[in-house]
Image (cartoon, rainbow, N blue to C red):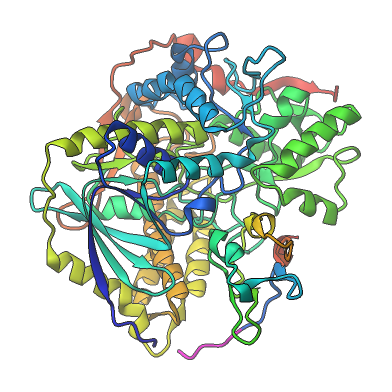
Amino acid sequence: MPIAHNATAVPVTVDDAKCIAEKGCRVCIDVCPLDVLAIKESTGKAFMKYNECWYCMPCEVDCPTGAVKVEIPYLLR
Amino acid sequence: MFDLDAKTEVVEADILVIGGGTGGPMAAIKAKEKNPKLKVLLLEKANVKRSGAISMGMDGLNNAVIPGYATPEQYVKEITVANDGIVHQKAVMAYATGSYPMIQYLDRLGVKFEKDGSGEYNVRKVHHMGTYVLPMPEGHNVKKALYRKLRQLQVMISNRYMATRLLKAVDGRISGAIAVNTRTGEFLVIRAKAVVLACGAAGRLGLPASGYLFGTYENPANCGDGYAMAYHAGADLANLECYQINPLIKDYNGPACAYVTGPFGGYTANNKGNRFIECDYWSGQMMLEFFRELQGGNGPVFLKIDHLAEETISTIETILHTNERPSRGRFHEQRGTNYRSSMIEMHISEIGFCSGHSASGVWVDENARTSVPGLYAVGDMASVPHNYMLGAFVNGGIAGGDAAEYCAALDLPGYEHGDVDAEIKRVLAPTRREDGFTAYEMEYKTRRFVNDYLQPPKVTAKYLIGQRRFAEIREDLGNLFVQDPHDLMRALEMQSILDCADMAAAASLYRTESRWGLYHMRTDHPYTDDENWFCHTMLFKNEKGQMSHRKRSVDDYIVPIDAAEMGAYHHLRTASPQAAE
């Protein structure tokens, strides 16, 4: 059966101006228990790739530059 | 279809610990402390730094057995009564006697507990009978303290590897596990003398009312992998019909934390602001009263703290918004819920398996041994009831110490290469298809049917339909399709969830009585039948590969219980509605 891709809003946002992933930082990606963050090839910055968030906050709390913000996913907000 | 060339590496260890959350790290730590020469490998699907149920820390111990406040005997009695008598008391006693030494050990590691002015632990009462709750207002650093110790003891850590099946030698001993990297799809065969399963609850079984698959009470990574692996390895699983169902903040699905607020004067209330239960401790009877209040026209149910003084509310707010689930502050803010002026709306959770809160787990004895030689289980997935975080630490420590001894005189057992080949083929099957059903769809459908057919009250006719639907989904696994290694992890998790759904249905149908309040409330068998069912139920995979059951009698109590005391948790409803204080 062919596959469709449905868009959703994601609860974790990364401020590209503050994110230092291009310098090798991987803190938010490392600490996510669900492995939903990744590096966007076009910008070299972290972003939320999979909408599978437990809104648990290590990514935000452990980010060394305060670039990550966790919102409550819209469906349960 | 994506290309995975299925590279497989083989590594050897003395002890393999699967799961780096709470009990797993402690098992690794205590094994190394017992014998520093052992090679201990800690395998984690996420990253040990922030994995498991306590990734952000914990706001209190719910079951601290501290001299001067409670004795191990009192605690064993409390849990026996709270769990309607179906407990292996020796295992509860092993926990209870290890409780205080573990608190002191964690204290030395740098974990912070609340103390009074003279440096004594500040223990509070929440349970029906005894006093066991020790707040941790600064409990956000638990994982950091564990991680430091793991590094100091040179425990080997492999992050982002998901174990998929256990390996056994021809003589039936455990001999390791197969794991797949969740980012590369590479396989790892770990040969080991002993394996400790510490994979957490099956917390992604029912579908949250929000419809968001990851909006669960438990860390959604804890999806029942451990239960599924133990089952396929032939281990016994105990009392799975004693579901975990929790009273939670509606939609947010995190704990409202009556345990935290209770000692400050907060309580669970109905829509009139009135108390309706005498005790907020989570038991099946408490959940039944909660369910009745929701159904009976007095709902919704709320956590009420708006009557407390400003400084008390500020203290509660600080504890609840900086530990365990800190995002709840944001949730309340967006909905305009201020603890000073509004009660906090609560709801009943979807079902799961969890011994940490209930009693559904892989059977273990007082040494944390499962029924498979060399295989241990600890924490939320092991059968020691109402064990919570401290139980995971204590039983993890017991498993680590016992496994270290078990290893001493043992050569590395062999394994069947055919088992590895078959497992790699099973894991990779969804990567070999051009298209099909996604893991997301198949998981959603499975979990929706869990809600539709398995959520108590349990009706036999509904359960039989549920089993048919699960069997149809199992046939659809032949069309399961994934696009990358991350998806592959979800597809494997989905298969664990389906295994747990089947186990939940089968275990519930087997016990033809009602017990544990709402957890096992069967409309076709509405009464508790001690004559036939005062026993553990064991679910296992038989030699033909079929799901089977047997009874296991409850061992003679080591702490006797008077008949009059046995009913203590059956009278939780307040005699008459009490006005807000």
**Position of A39 relative to B357 (above/below):** below
Which quarter of the figure is the C terminus of chain B placed in? top right
B270 lies left or right of B36: right
Residue B307, position as x, y percentages in the image: 88, 29
Q: How many marks?
A: 0
Residue B548, position as x, y percentages in the image: 24, 48
Residue B193, position as x, y percentages in the image: 19, 46
A50 lies left or right of B16: right
Camera sees residue A55:
no
Residue at (26% x, 47% y) in the render: B39
Q: Nearer the viewer, residue B335 or B514?
A: B335
Q: Nearer the viewer, residue B264 or A67?
A: A67
Quarter of the image for residue B311 reads top right
**Position of B232 relative to B277 (above/below):** below
Q: Main secondary structure of the magenta part?
A: loop
Is A3 magenta? The answer is: yes
Quarter of the image for residue B225 reads bottom left
Residue at (51% x, 25% y) in the render: B103
The residue segment tinted magenta is A1-5
**Position of B131 relative to B519 (above/below):** above
B209 lies left or right of B157: right
Which residue reaches farthest left?
B171
Which quarter of the figure is the N terminus of chain B placed in? bottom left
Is B164 magenta? The answer is: no
Quarter of the image for residue B292 reads top right
Q: Nearer the viewer, residue B97 or B466?
A: B97
Residue B300, position as x, y percentages in the image: 76, 43
Residue at (63% x, 14% y) in the render: B120
Camera sees residue A30:
yes
